[in-house]
Image (cartoon, grey):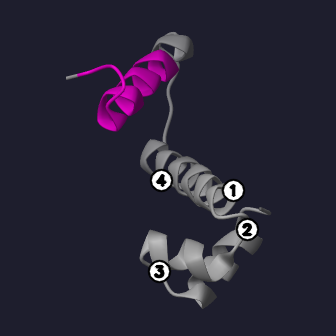
Amino acid sequence: MNSTDLPACIYAKLDRYFEQLNGESTSGVYKMVMQETESVTIKFILDMVGQNQSEAARILGVNRGTLKKKIELYKL
C-alpha cells in the first residue's frame, strides 16, 4: 500500500495514537475516529468549493440539511 493511500494514512495515525498512549487504557476510539474524519472531510470539501453548501452536499453525497447540521455540530 502506498503511504499516500487514505487507509494507510489512517492506519499510521492510529498506530502513533496507540504508541503515545504508552499502554494506558482507552475507549471510544471508533467514535473519535469517525468524528475526526467526518469533520476534516466536510471542512476540506467546503474549502474546495468555496463554502458552496449545495455543491459540497452533492460531492459528499448527503442532503443540504444534513450538511448544515454537521457544519453546526463541528462548528465549521
8 vs 61: above or below: above
The residue range painted magenta reads 2-18
Task: Return the residue at label 3.
Answer: 62
Residue 2 spot, x, y in % from top left: 26, 21
49 vs 32: above or below: below
Residue 55 spot, x, y in % from top left: 57, 77
Asked if labels 1 and 4 touch by Cβ distance under 8 angstroms, the answer is no
At label 1, the amino acid type is Asp
Asked if labels 4 and 2 touch by Cβ distance under 8 angstroms, the answer is no
Instruction: Please give the label number shown on residue 47.
Output: 1
> Is residue 3 highlighted in magenta?
yes
Task: Pick the residue in front: 50 or 64.
Answer: 50
At label 4, the amino acid type is Met
Residue at the spot 52% in from the left edge and 10% down from the top edge: 22
Task: Pick the residue in front: 50 or 63.
Answer: 50
Quarter of the image with the N terminus is top left
Q: Nearer the viewer, mark 3 or mark 4?
A: 3
